[in-house]
Image: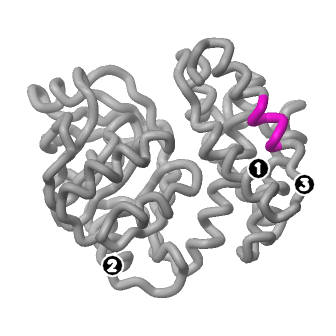
Amino acid sequence: MKVLVYGAGALGSLVGGLLAREHDVTLVGRDPHMRRIREDGLRIDGEVDARVTPRALTDGRHRAADLALVTTKAYDTDAAARALATGEYEAVCSLQNGLTEERLVAALDATVLAGTASYGARFVEPGRVTCTGIGAVVVGALSGGASPAAARVGAAFEAAGVEVTVADDMPVRRFEKLAVNAGINGPSALARTENGPTLDGPAGGVAREAARETARVARAVGVDLPDERAVTAVERVAGDTAANRSSMREDVENGRRTEVDAVYGAVVDRADRHGVPAPTCRTVGSLIRGWEASRGLR
C-alpha cells in the first residue's frame, strides 16, 4: 500500500517507520528530522529495532496515496486538511488526540476513518525515534459499523507486523480515547509525573474523575460509554505506559503549546452545550491554559 504520514514527529515517524518495513511510505514533517531521514534513513530503537528508508518531505501538498495518516498535533489539523485537500487519497485516518475527524471530513473528499494508536514513541534526535512501548492501532468507520476501507487499512497494518484491530464501534472508542487523554495528560503535566504515578498517586482521583466526566459527556451526545469503561481504560493505559511521559507533560517540560483545547476543550464545550457538569475537566483545562498564557503560547 502507498501511505503518506502527515505530521511525522515521534508517533508519526514510529508508525510510518513500522509500515515502511512492508509498504511504500512517505513521511511529511519538519527539518532537520526529514533531512536526516533523507540522508541516513530512519532508525527506530527501544522496544522495536529497525532501520528503514521512507521518503521524507517537508511539503505535503499535491501528493497521492492509498492512505494518509494524520499524526499532527490536534491544533494543526486544519493546516493538515488544507494540504491533504490538494492531493488524492482513497482514505484518510486520524491517529491524533482529541476529536479531530469532523474537521477532516469537512475539508476532504476522501473517506475519513477514525483511529487510535497506543504505541509509546519518543523523539530522540533527527533521524531517530524510540519505541517506548508496544501497543496497537485501532481503525474503523467514523460513524461505526463495517467499513471496506477500514478493512483494507487494517490488512496493511497487519502485513507490516503492526498489531491492529478493525473496529465497528469507533464512536465509543473515540470518546474512550478522549477519556484517556483527559485522565492522563493534564494531571501528569501539572503534577510532573509519569503516567503510572499519575494514577497511583494523589493525582489519581483527578484523573479518574476527568475520565468519568468525559463518559458523561459521551452519553449526553448519544455515545454509550459507561463511567467504568472510561476509568478502566485510563487505568489500563497508565499501567501499560507507566514509565512514559504523556505528550502534554512533554509539551509543558519543553515550553511548547499543548493540546488542551482538543482534549479539555472538547469535553467542556460539549458539556456546556448539553448541560452536563464537567468541573474537573474545566479546572484542569483552565490551569493548563493559564500556564500557556503566562508563557505567551496563547
Q: CA distance from mark 1 to mark 3?
A: 8 Å
| Label 1 or label 3, whichever comes before in sequence order | 1
Q: Can residue 231 be seen by looking at this rendering?
A: no
Looking at the magenta stretch, what is its main secondary structure?
Answer: helix
- In the rendering, at what x and y percent does residue 143 appear? 53, 78
- Which span is picked out in magenta? 281-286
Q: CA distance from mark 2 to mark 1?
A: 32 Å
Q: Is residue 112 magenta?
A: no
Q: Which residue is mark 1?
A: 268
Vertical side of 241 occupied by 104: above or below: below
Q: Which mark is residue 149?
A: 2
Q: Which mark is residue 277?
A: 3
Identify the secondary structure beneath mark 1: helix
Quarter of the view holding residue 231: bottom right
Identify the secondary structure beneath mark 2: helix
Say which residue appears at 11% left-offset and 31% top-offset: 38
Q: How many numbered badges does the structure rendering display?
A: 3
Task: Give, as a three-letter code, the residue at label 2.
Answer: Ala
Say which residue appears at 36% left-offset and 44% top-offset: 79
Task: Give, as a three-letter code, the residue at label 3.
Answer: Pro
Vertical side of 232 occupied by 109: above or below: below
| Label 2 or label 1, whichever comes before in sequence order | 2
Task: Give, as a three-letter code, the residue at label 1.
Answer: Val
Say which residue appears at 12% left-offset and 27% top-offset: 40
